[in-house]
Structure formats: C-alpha cells, structure tokens
Amino acid sequence: MPSYTVTVATGTQWFAGTDDYVYLSLEGTAGCSERHLLDKPFYNDFERGAVDSYDVTVEEDLGEIQLLKIEKRKYWYQDDWYLKYVTVKTPMGDYLEFPCYRWITDEKEIVLRDGRAKLPRDDKTQILKQHRRKELETRQKMYRWKEWHPGFPLSIDAHSHSDLPRDIQFDNEKGIDFILNYSKAMENLYINRFMHMFQSSWSDFADFERIFVRISNTISEYVMQHWKEDFMFGYQFLNGCNPVLIRRCTEIPKKFPVTMDMVECSLERNLTLEEEVKQGNIFIVDYELLDGVDANKTDPCTIQYLAAPVCLLYKNLENKIVPIAIQLGQKPGPDNPIFLPSDATYDWLLAKIWVRSSDFHIHQTVTHLLRTHLVSEVFSIAMFRQLPAVHPLFKLLVPHMRFTIAINTKAREQLICECGLFDKANATGGGGHVQMVQKAVKDLTYSSLCFPEEIKAKGMDSKEDIPYYFYRDDGIKVWEAIKNFAEDVIHIYYESDEVVCEDVELQAFVKDIYVYGMRGVKASGFPKVIRTREKLAEYLTVIIFTTSAQHAAVNFGQYDWCSWIPNAPPTMRRPPPTEKGTVTIEQIVETLPDRGRSCWHLGAVWALSQFQDNELFLGMYPDEHFVEKPVKEAMAKFRKNLDEIVNTITERNKNKKLPYYYLSPDRIPNSVAV
C-alpha cells in the first residue's frame, strides 16, 4: 500500500505547541485518504519548536495531492497550536511543501494547498476553485471594515486586541501594552519620581537634564548641546524624525509678508529676496493644518496652547538650511509679528520652540499615525479580505503586514482613545488629534505615497542643490530596491499586462483599498483598477515602502530628536507671544511642559523608538510562504541590493556627529509593529 511521509513543524512562539488530538487527511486527484491520528495527548509531539515526522499509509494511490487537512480536537482545555508548515514525501519520492504559519484554535481545522503560488486563472479543478473561494468568504467575515471616526480611513472592526483573529494578534500581548511599556520606560529612565508632578515647572533649561542625561546617546546628546542653534533647527527639516514637510518656496505667500528689509542681514549672496526665491535658495514649512484645531482641555488645572506657524528657511553659502523668518499664526497683523534672527535672543528662541512644538504635533498625528499606521492597516485588511494564501501577492505582502492591525487596535484601545495616554502630555490630545487627521486626509494622495514623486513635487529632488538631504538619498535607494524586487516577482507570475487585468483577486484588493481605505474619494488618486505590470510594480512598492521604510524613517528617531524636551515640546502652557521684546527665560520655561508631562513624553518617545523583540528587518523572510526557486533567487538578489545600501550608508556615516541611519535596511523593520 502507498505510504506518504509527513513532516509537521510547530512554531517557536511561547505556548505554540499543543497536547490536543491532531488528525491529518490528504485529498488528491485520484481520491482521499482517511483521517489519520498523528498525535495523542501527552505523546510529547508538537511541542514548541518541534519538527515531527509520521508515515501515513493509504489503500491506493491518491494521485496528485491537492489539499491537506489538519484537524485539532480538544483533549482537556483550550490549547492553541501554531503550525508553521507541513511537508509531504509522496510514494514517488517527490516533496510537497504546505506553508501554514497560522494558529489552529479551539476545535478547528485548516485546509492547506501546497506552497506553489497560483493566480485565479491557474486553478483548473473545481475543488481548488472552491477552496480559494471559501477561504476568502471566511476571511471576509473575520476581517470587517469599521469607521473609527468620521472621515478617517476605515479600520478593523474590533474593540480590543483580544477581539482580533488569533493569526494577527501579538504573540505576547503584554509586550505591546502601552500603559505597561510607558511606565517601564519611565522607571528605566529613572524619571518615575517626576511623573505625577503636573503643573510643576522646571527651573531652567539645565533642569531638563535631570530627566535626560542618564540614557543619552550620540544624536540626542548633540541635540541637547546644539538645539538653540539655527543650523540644528534647519537640519531637522531635512534629517530629523519629520523630514517630509519642507518644500522649495516658489513665491512668498501673501499671508506671510516677509520683506527684503526684514531678512537682508540673513542673505549671503548679495541678491534680493525675490532673486533668492527664483534661484531656489528659499524654502518654506507651513503648519496651516493646525489652524483652528482645539487644544487639549482634559486637565482643567493646565491651559494648553497650539499655534499654526509659517517658517521661511534659507540655503546659505555652506549649503546649510537655516531659518530666516517665523510667523506664529496664519493671519498677518500687528499682534502676529514676524520673528527674525536679528531679534532679541529669547524672542527668536521662543519662536523656534513654537515651530518645533507644532512640528511635533504634525509628526505624531499626520506623518506617523495617518500616513504610516492607518494607511498600512488599510493595506493589511484589504489583503486579508481579497487575497487568498495561495496568491503570489499575498505571499509577497504578508510579511509586511505583520502585527500592524494588532498595534493599531491596541493604540485605539489605550493610546489615542478618549482619555487615553495621548491625552496626558500632548496639546493635541482630547480630540485635537482627531480633528487633525480629518483635515489631513484630503492631502493623503496616492502620488504623495510614491516617494520619488513626492520629493520632486516639493522641489527637493536635486542632490546638487540640496546635498545634505539624507532622508531623500537613502529613501530613493530603498524605494528602487523594493521596486526592482516587486518587478522580479511580478514577472514570474504575470507574463503580460493582460494577465494583470484578468486577475480578479488583485482587482478586488485594489478596489477595497480605494473604496474603504480612501473612502472612494476620486481626488485621492488611488487607482480603482490596475491594468499593467508597470503600474502593479509601483503599487506594490508604495505598499511595501510605506509599511517598512517610511514608518522606520519617521518612527525610530523619536528618542534621538524629541527626548530633549525644549527641542520638541509636546505641549505649551502659555499662548504664543503677540509682540517682540517681552520674552524672558522665565517666560520660556513657564511655557514649556511641566515636570509630569515632560516625563510622560520622554517615556513615550523612548518606548516608541524601540524595536520589537525578534524584529524582522527588510528582506528577512523566515516564513517561507514562497517555495519556488525563481522567487527565492529574487529574494536573494533583493537582500544583496539591500546589503549594498547598508554598506553605502555605513561608509557615509563614518565620523559624522549626526549620522543618518533610519533608512539603513538593517534598521528598517518589515512592518508597522510599534
């Protein structure tokens, strides 16, 4: 009688093994096997990290194996089991791989196909078509869209992390408990003695060092030492944790009436302001989005304030970007003066602090939350709803969706919910952050997520004109590496543009993102359909780049750039100055966050800047969803390209006081998971 050798691999996560009854059956083109009991309770098979082998004998040859069914039946108590993969050696000596990488919970069963990726057109038999359809029907019941706030991209329909499908939950929920992690961070930073000291001001700038110096690092120390300097202020628009706002100024806005007389002493080329603009030496950052946003009112003992400044910057003869004018409100007038480097020292310093505070708010809520976390969740939900596990694009994308829905759900549960942790220290807490996302969605366009296109649209693409924009330089390299990888995979499975058009699952995936993620807004520019391999490669690059590189660029520098509180105040306790010549050091300290809010802020940026345990970085694919040799060769080529980028960045950063490494592929996690 024919005999099949079955090998079963259990995951290495905590509690991945099982003591339940486990059955296996095979279904081939010539028949089906009986249920075979692989493991009984306490036989010590299917333990964490184990690889167990069994001989399965059948009465007659089953033909080509199409499906493999694994059933788990409870012995005593609920005992979830993480199944990595199953391999089957046929009587003819052929090996078939059945990737799983899923949890089998309760008394459930999983039906697997072998690991060869297939498009819908490749399935010829009714049984395979039915399996494909049933998998998506099941997933669409589990992964439902829900509106968290009006106008937001839709998110997962789950009230808490425990409501999520087991396959997308964190392995250890305590590891991503924001309350626990923030408290631990403050304990590790030795600042927990200050955390309850709300309304208590610091004595002076040096007093902030009491919560800073214990875990200082290269960049954060440098920021502490140089934060008052105009060079450091300007540099952060290029290579800080929010390097996405600066754009070349083509015309001085009417709402920001800067004159030549105001800035003449800052210009170095003997040109007028208008001539400097024409030559491309003037840049602008506008925080108009913050205009009209309600400041945090959750603490009646502390009035908090927001501003919506406009900042003009200049590229000097050393090619450094420095500020030359700041207006703290959107409407010009006598009570909204334009602050200049030639003003009194504290006037100019406070104006820059207000810009840094506004930058922090835009960074946290728009650059970070909306444009990486919420967008990546849209991609994740659509993928689970519309792409079956056998689809090559599911196999390509699933490593880049790891834990994204889980971290966002946990954030809605603890961090950015009403009365959440975000309210404790941030001036945009208490609902302001919601207003900001609702306003910012209109600028969330497909082209703005295409990295090279967005850089060019801002007039920031010239390396010759702007030589020290490392975010741009490294981002372009990583974008191109991802795009080349996507193209390689696409050409393996899509032999022509016609095949792209015919892929109904791909088109459903794209439509889900447009209709639910982007709310069907035509102005978003998100495609409703994809008709060419070239457009598909760009689309996949947008997804992978956003979930990996873009998030890394704007997330993991938060401690570096925001731990020195005066450089990134999360709230301000006095209104913006309405006249010049009145600012004192005491007024600045009274304006900056109190001791309690400073500590909560420091704990937050520390916790958010840490990689996950066992982090998987770009190009690392330990779960072998793909089994075909051409794809594995494409992955090896991708990793080689990424290694070259790492070497280039490492060489550039040598001996730099301000190294830029956030887009080094060995520091880019595959997915949004923190």
Image (cartoon, grey):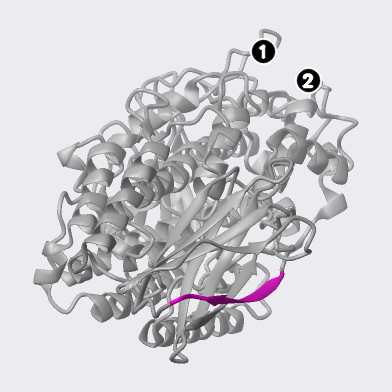
* Residue 278 horizontal/vertical position (percent): 23, 58
Judged left or right of residue 269, residue 23 is right
The mark found on residue 345 in the picture is none
Which residues are the magenta region? 50-59
| Residue that badge 1 annotates | 299
Q: Assess whether residue 57 is covered by the magenta stretch.
A: yes
Residue 458 shows in this picture: no
Residue 146 higher or lower than 43, as above or below: above
The mark found on residue 198 in the picture is 2
- CB under 8 Å between callouts 2 and 1? yes
Give the quarter of the image for residue 438: top left
Q: Amino acid at mark 1?
A: Asp
Q: Earlier in the sequence, mark 2 or mark 1?
A: 2
Helix, strand or loop at mark 2: loop
Work out whether residue 579 or residue 617 is closer to the camera in this orientation and state it. Answer: 617
Q: Amino acid at mark 2?
A: Phe
